[in-house]
């Protein structure tokens, strides 16, 4: 049977192809070697991330989360073949969406991320570029789990939320508040037990950046009560 | 014609720069500085500030001589009010307030981080770059959007320059931190050839270097020869730089920028430059670094940024010109940036 391989995107660490075979469309993700990386490190790196991504995708897919189903994995050549998903990156479309749509997306994303965290899995690179949005079906998918992992440490969960907030703040600063309010609402619905703790941690992470005035104020207050 | 004098004293460098703007272009007329080099350990804020106070008159005179103008011809005094070390900032601020009041010149408040980026853009001829800002106090990735620089990602603990300096100091290689323009960690990397697997911590576009530092120091403790220490240095440098390049690459693809600009004190590092250039080329983006005379802390960058602010009418009363030890890059509204 005839099959066709078309390059559709070049991500930061992988080339994404569409494979048309067996009468259907599939995604081939190939982690490529980088000229700037130390050769010994490069190999280790690609192998590790391919394995992680495949494992996590399998677990999330079987738990009913909207992620592409992994179908075939070759860690030695750093290749994953997975389900084809139709959609555009939220980073490309967010500016053109109406506030009502944004609210729905944010609250649904909150639910998914909450569910993912309740499975003790973190994403590690949760930015708008890693969320696909399909306008016709009004659905979102989470992709790219190369930096993901298993952890019971709420720090990792809080980092996920911090990353999504920072990504919105950089690309569409005016909707940050709206987005995050809905995100947290959704998140609390699926992961209520540690919701408060994580919210506090996210605020703490924000203060870890360099030269933040609030951090100084907090220390002064602390000294007053000592 | 407009002349602006800029004063830099945020950390180890006391510098004065003078820029000129005529109808068609902007030129740097003088860029004089004196650097505080600790005899042992790292920067001692008080010692550094004493150095600045001692050197200030001489640096000022020599900058004016070099530019060939009198202080009366200056149209505005720009000063870096932050972020930085308090005692050091106060020296520059005091001099600036004095000059502005005594000679009745407008005083212009400049953010040190903004200045690093603006001078980088000016020298490179870039208009809308992805900015990678690496120094002893900052490690961040930024873009310009809605009249400000927006931070896409940054270090969650120590900055890159701090990582390299602390490592070099703890293993006994520094001070001096830099010999003939080459950092001690780079010199030591040439002794090694093996790669050790060290903690690689990238979270989205954010980074963390503290685990890498601890692990490297542990390995260095076990090193029994020059070559073994070299292996640690090499692995530390490769891991840290690969992390920076990876987040830069991710940011580049996220934003689709066509220019990549490296600024800050660590921008003069050859190994980092090569990696970033290779990455930018891979994605068809133009890469420019910043030459050593304007990548480290200097007065010219303050003067140049002061000029941009002055042309947009941003000045401050001397009695209100307080220093700000903490003053983030993304807090400053800059009228010349696109919306």
Image (cartoon, coloured by chain):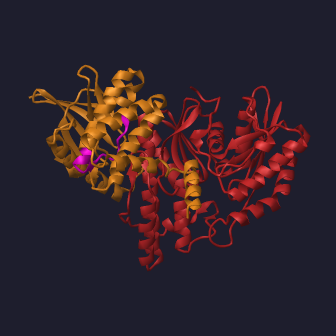
Chain colours: A orange, B red
B26 displayed left or right of A72 = right
Task: Give the percent coordinates (x, y) of residue B53.
Answer: 80, 60
| Count of marks placed on residues | 0
Residue B189 in sight in this render: yes
Relative to A138, B124 lies left or right: right
Q: Residue at x 80, y 29 (%)?
A: B22
Quadrant location, the N terminus of chain A: top left
Quarter holding residue A90: top left
Rendered location of residue A160, percent (x, y): 35, 45
Residue visible at 88% across and 39% down in the picture = B104
Query: Image height check: is A74 above or below A81?
Result: below
The magenta region covers: A116-128
Residue that lies at the very extreme toward the bottom in this rendered image: B224
Q: What residue is shown at x 49% (from left), y 44% (from top)? A: B277
> Closer to the camera, B128 or B203?
B203
- Is A127 within the magenta? yes
Judging depth in this view, the residue of A181 and B185 nearest the camera is A181
Decide: is A36 above or below B225. Answer: above
Answer above or below: position of A41 versus B68: below
The answer to whether residue A215 is magenta is no
Give the percent coordinates (x, y) of residue B247: 43, 46
Q: Position of residue A41 (x, y in %)?
A: 35, 57
Quarter of the rendering occupied by the C terminus of chain A: bottom right
* Residue B136 in sight: no
């Amino acid at each position: 049977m005839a099959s066709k391989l078309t390059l559709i995107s070049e991500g930061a660490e992988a080339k994404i192809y569409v494979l048309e075979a067996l009468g259907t469309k599939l995604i081939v993700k190939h982690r490529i070697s980088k000229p700037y990386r130390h050769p010994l490190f490069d190999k280790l790196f690609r192998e590790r991330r391919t394995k992680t991504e495949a494992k996590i995708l399998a677990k999330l897919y079987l738990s009913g989360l909207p992620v592409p189903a992994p179908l075939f994995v070759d860690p030695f050549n750093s290749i994953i073949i997975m389900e084809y998903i139709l959609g555009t990156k939220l980073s490309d479309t967010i500016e053109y969406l109406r506030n009502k749509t944004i609210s729905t997306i944010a609250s649904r994303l909150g639910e998914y991320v909450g569910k993912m965290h309740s499975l003790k899995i973190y994403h590690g690179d949760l930015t708008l570029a890693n969320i696909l949005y399909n306008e016709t079906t009004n659905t979102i998918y989470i992709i790219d789990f190369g930096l993901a992992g298993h952890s019971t440490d709420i720090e990792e969960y809080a980092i996920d939320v911090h990353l999504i907030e920072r990504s919105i703040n950089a690309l569409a600063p005016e909707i940050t508040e709206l987005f995050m309010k809905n995100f947290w609402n959704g998140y609390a619905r699926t992961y209520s037990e540690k919701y408060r703790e994580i919210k506090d941690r996210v605020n703490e992470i924000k203060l870890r950046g360099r030269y933040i005035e609030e951090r100084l104020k907090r220390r002064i207050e602390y000294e007053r009560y000592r | 014609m407009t002349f602006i004098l800029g004063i830099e004293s945020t950390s180890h460098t006391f510098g004065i720069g003078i820029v000129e703007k005529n109808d068609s272009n902007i030129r740097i007329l003088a860029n004089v500085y004196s650097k505080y080099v600790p005899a042992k350990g790292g920067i001692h804020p008080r010692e550094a500030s004493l150095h600045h106070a001692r050197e200030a008159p001489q640096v000022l005179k020599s900058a004016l001589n070099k530019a060939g103008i009198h202080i009366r011809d200056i149209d505005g005094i720009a000063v870096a009010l932050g972020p930085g070390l308090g005692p050091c900032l106060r020296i520059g601020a005091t001099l600036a307030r004095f000059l502005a009041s005594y000679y009745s010149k407008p005083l212009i408040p400049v953010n040190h981080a903004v200045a690093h980026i603006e001078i980088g853009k000016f020298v490179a001829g870039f208009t809308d770059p992805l900015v990678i800002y690496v120094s002893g106090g900052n490690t961040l990735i930024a873009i310009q959007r809605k009249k400000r620089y927006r931070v896409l990602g940054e270090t969650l603990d120590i900055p890159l320059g701090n990582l390299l300096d602390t490592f070099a100091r703890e293993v006994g290689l520094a001070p001096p931190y830099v010999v003939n323009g080459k950092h001690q960690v780079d010199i030591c990397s040439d002794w090694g050839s093996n790669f050790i697997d060290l903690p690689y911590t990238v979270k989205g576009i954010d980074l963390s270097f503290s685990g890498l530092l601890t692990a490297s120091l542990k390995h260095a403790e076990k090193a029994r020869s020059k070559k073994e220490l070299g292996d640690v240095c090499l692995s530390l440098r490769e891991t840290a730089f690969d992390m920076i390049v990876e987040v830069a690459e991710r940011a580049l693809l996220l934003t689709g920028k066509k220019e990549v600009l490296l600024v800050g004190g660590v921008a003069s590092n050859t190994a980092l430059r090569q990696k970033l250039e290779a990455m930018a080329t891979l994605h068809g983006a133009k890469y420019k670094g910043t030459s050593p005379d304007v990548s480290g802390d200097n007065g010219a960058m303050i003067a140049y940024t002061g000029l941009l602010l002055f042309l947009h009418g941003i000045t401050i009363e001397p009695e209100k010109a307080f220093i700000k030890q903490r003053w983030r890059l993304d807090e400053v509204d800059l009228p010349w940036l696109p919306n």
